[in-house]
Image: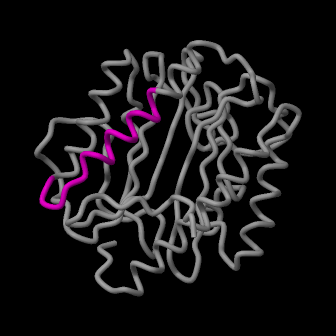
């Protein structure tokens, strides 16, 4: 979407703030002993109260309201009876459509307050978070979407991590997945031109392994072949002439 009206800007902002509040609640709830299904149940109730739709389910027929991917599960983990353990590297991906506008955001957490995480998992998490920050900082009206991916990949290389190139960010608006694609890699100065009001997700997915993945028998969950941990962070961002505006953050108001 290119948000050209006040209604579009406000609609995208509200949908993403509602989504961000859900993600914040889920990261607090994600404690040892919690089943991933319990997190999904909380998300279903939250979305119903907000008057929204679980857009992963309604738009793409995903069998849950959220994605919960643990450790070597890269993306699209299906919530179920898996019990979270202290030290697990959990990715929670939330998507909501509210009043015709979509919100999308992801965070990675180490499960367990005060848990001393495995060094490898902690390093991947920190790298993915910093890669997201670098990608957002590269957003410029008049720039190119590849500038974002180039900034992300530079962080990954410095941290000796690998970007999972199979998965990209995307335009977002009235539908969850719109054009353009926002790769997390590549040379700068190529791809679609970033224009004022363009709304898209930036979502680097990094691993400490070789980057090979496979589809699990459930038909959804993607896992690393070598069992290496994966971390992902995602924000929905609007490009403006004043700089990037992160929509998927909880307002202080």
Residue drawn 25% across and 66% down? 240
Residue drawn 12% across and 60% down? 142
Quadrant in which the C terminus appears: bottom right
The one of 78 and 151 positioned closer to us in this rendering: 151
**How many marks do you count on the picture?**
0
Q: Quadrant of residue 78?
A: top right
Name of the residue lying farthest toward the front: 253
Rendering coords of residue 139 (x, y %): 25, 52
Q: Is residue 120 magenta?
A: no
Where 188 sits versus 111, above or below?
below
Q: Is residue 139 magenta?
A: yes
Name of the residue lying farthest toward the right: 33
Rendering coords of residue 235 (x, y %): 46, 53
In the image, taking residue 212 as reference, residue 250 lies left or right, namely right
Rendering coords of residue 175 (x, y %): 46, 71
The one of 65 and 58 positioned closer to us in this rendering: 65
Q: Quadrant of residue 88?
A: top right
Colouring rule applied to residues? one colour
Quadrant in which the N terminus appears: bottom left
Residue drawn 26% across and 44% down? 148
Rendering coords of residue 230 (x, y %): 54, 27
In the image, taking residue 72 as reference, residue 245 lies left or right, namely left
Where 152 sits versus 210, above or below?
below
Q: Which residues are magenta?
A: 127-143
Residue drawn 39% across and 49% down? 202
Where 174 sits versus 37, above or below?
below
The one of 68 and 124 positioned closer to us in this rendering: 124
What secondary structure do most residues of the magenta stretch adopt? helix
């Amino acid at each position: 979407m290119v948000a050209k009206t006040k209604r579009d800007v406000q609609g995208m902002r509200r949908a993403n703030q509602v989504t961000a509040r859900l993600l914040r609640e889920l990261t607090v709830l994600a404690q040892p002993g919690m089943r991933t299904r319990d997190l999904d149940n909380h998300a279903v109730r939250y979305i119903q109260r907000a008057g929204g739709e679980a857009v992963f389910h309604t738009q793409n027929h995903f069998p849950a309201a959220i994605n919960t991917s643990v450790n070597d599960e890269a993306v699209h983990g299906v919530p179920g009876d898996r019990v979270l353990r202290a030290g697990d590297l959990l990715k929670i991906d939330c998507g909501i459509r509210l009043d015709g506008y979509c919100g999308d955001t992801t965070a990675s957490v180490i499960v367990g307050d005060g848990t001393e995480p495995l060094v490898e998992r902690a390093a991947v998490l920190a790298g993915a978070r910093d890669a997201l920050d670098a990608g957002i900082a590269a957003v410029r009206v008049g720039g190119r979407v590849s500038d974002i991916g180039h900034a992300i990949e530079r962080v990954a290389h410095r941290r000796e991590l690998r970007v999972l190139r199979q998965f990209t960010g995307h335009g977002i608006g009235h539908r969850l997945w719109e054009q353009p694609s926002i790769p997390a890699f590549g040379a700068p100065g190529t791809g679609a031109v970033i224009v004022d009001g363009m709304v898209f997700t930036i979502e680097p997915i990094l691993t400490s392994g070789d980057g090979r993945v496979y589809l699990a028998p459930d038909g959804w969950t993607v896992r690393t072949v070598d069992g290496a941990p994966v971390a992902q962070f995602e924000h929905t961002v609007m490009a403006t002439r004043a700089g990037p505006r992160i929509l998927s953050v909880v307002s202080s108001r």
